[in-house]
Amino acid sequence: MKEEQAKKHIYLIMGYSGLLLIGLAVFRNLSVEKDHVEYGFLTFGSLFLIVYFKFADDKIGATKKEKAFYRIGLVGGLWLIAFYTN
C-alpha cells in the first residue's frame, strides 16, 4: 500500500513539475515574442493540458487534498516566478 502511495506522489510531483516548466517556458516566450496568435495557442494549449491533468489525477486515485496541495504549489510557484521576473 505504501508503494502505491509513493508511486502516486512521484507521478503527481513529476506531472506538476512538468506543468511548472511548461508555464515557465510560456512566460519566457511571451515576454520575448509578443505574438497575438501565439497567445491564443498557448492559452488554449494550457487549458487543454489542465483538463487532461484533472482527468489523469482522477485516474491515479489522487484525493482532493492531494490534488489541492499540488495545484496550490504549482500556482504559487508560477506566481512567484512571474512576479520576480517582471
Image: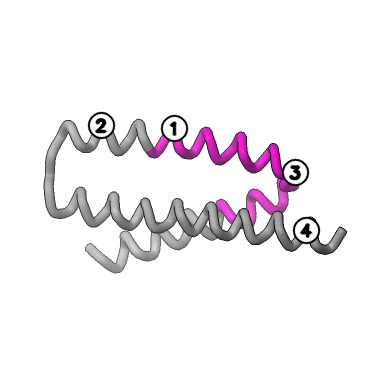
The amino acid marked with disc number 1 is Phe
Of the two numbered discs 2 and 1 on the same chain, state the one appearing first in sequence. Answer: 2
Quarter of the image where the N terminus is located = bottom right
Residue 61 shows which numbered tag? 3
In the image: residue 81, left or right of residue 58: left
The amino acid marked with disc number 3 is Gly
Residue 60 percent across, percent down from the top left: 71, 44
Distance CA(mark 2)–CA(mark 1):
12 Å
Q: How packed is label 3: few (under 14 Cα within 10 Å), some, or many (20 or more)?
A: few
Secondary structure category for the residue under label 3:
loop
Of the two numbered discs 2 and 3 on the same chain, state the one appearing first in sequence. Answer: 2
Distance CA(mark 1)–CA(mark 3):
20 Å
The amino acid marked with disc number 4 is Gln
Q: Residue at x 23, y 37 (%)?
A: 39
Residue that carries the numbered disc 4 in the rendered image: 5
Residue 32 percent across, percent down from the top left: 13, 54
- In this rendering, the label closer to the viewer, 2 or 3: 3
Secondary structure category for the residue under label 1:
helix
Of the two numbered discs 1 and 3 on the same chain, state the one appearing first in sequence. Answer: 1
Residue that carries the numbered disc 1 in the rendered image: 48
For the magenta stretch, what is the residue range? Answer: 46-71
Q: Residue at x 12, y 48 (%)?
A: 33
In the image: residue 24, left or right of residue 15: left
